[in-house]
Image (spheres, rainbow, N blue to C red):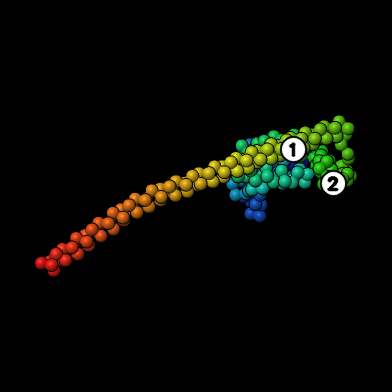
Amino acid sequence: FDTKVDLTPQLLGRITDAAENVVAVKEFSGDVRRVWQIHHYAPRIEVMVGADDVLLELSTGGVCGWIAGFPNALPKESVELYNLCISGKYSEAKPIYAAVHNLFNWDSRKEFIQAIKLAMDAVGRYGGPTRLPRLPLPPADLAQCKKDIETTQDSLLSKKNEAYEKSVIIAELKNEILSLKNEILSLKNDMSEYENHIDFGGIAESGTSNIFGFSKLQNAKTGSKTSKRRA
């Protein structure tokens, strides 16, 4: 624990009972079971994720926010990850979480400031050197942190490429579906014109027959009157 003071769920319960102005707690003990215990012993207060490498796990227990470090270096990816976790879309969040987790794990170490600044420098956001009393990372830690940053960048880039390829495939499928819909519509129009042509022919024949029949009837009536007059 960075603060060296462990606010246990039981202690939080006592504090929240005694102090109404305590409304939330930053949970960064690293024990993902704590979120459930805090909700049990201190149900009145909200829980906020306090470490980057437990975001997904704590979100399953109900959280209202995230006090984070590495979004300074990876803001877009972090916001996407947070929104997916809060929405319960864990299957979509899992690949992103896996890609960034080794790097996010530095947020739970005492060298988290140096690691975050180093990651910011790596992505062109300028983290700069740490201020005293913090010192630069030792060579071994520096090498490992750079490796984790590089691995994370490669993984995220690979996922972006996969997402782009999928979007291209989806766009092509949509175009094919649209083309098929247009072909079907064209066939329907052709069928409709063909059916109208057949119906029109039938009506025309029927009409001719009626006209002829009407003419014969008129001729018969006319002939009958003429015969009477002659008589």
Q: Amino acid at mark 2?
A: Tyr
Q: Position of residue 102 (x, y in %)?
A: 75, 34
Give the percent coordinates (x, y) of residue 204.
Answer: 34, 54
Residue position for label 1: 157
Nearer-N-terminus badge (1/2): 2
Asked which quadrant contains residue 118, the reply is top right
Q: Residue at x 47, y 47 (%)?
A: 190
Q: Position of residue 98 (x, y in %)?
A: 69, 34
Where residue 116 sits, quadrant-wise, is top right
Q: Residue at x 47, y 48 (%)?
A: 189
Q: Nearer the viewer, residue 59 or 82?
A: 82
Q: Quadrant of the C terminus?
A: bottom left
Q: Which residue is label 2 attached to?
A: 126
Q: Residues within 10 Å of mark 1 (few under 14, many from 20)?
A: few
Of 222 and 179, the residue lying toward us: 222
Instruction: Work out whether residue 100 can be spotted.
Output: no
Mark 2 lies on a secondary structure that is loop
Q: Mark on residue 89?
A: none
Give me the C-alpha separation between circle 1 and circle 2: 20 Å
- Mark 2, residues whose alpha carbon is within 10 Å: few (<14), some, or many (≥20)? some
Q: Is residue 182 visible?
A: yes
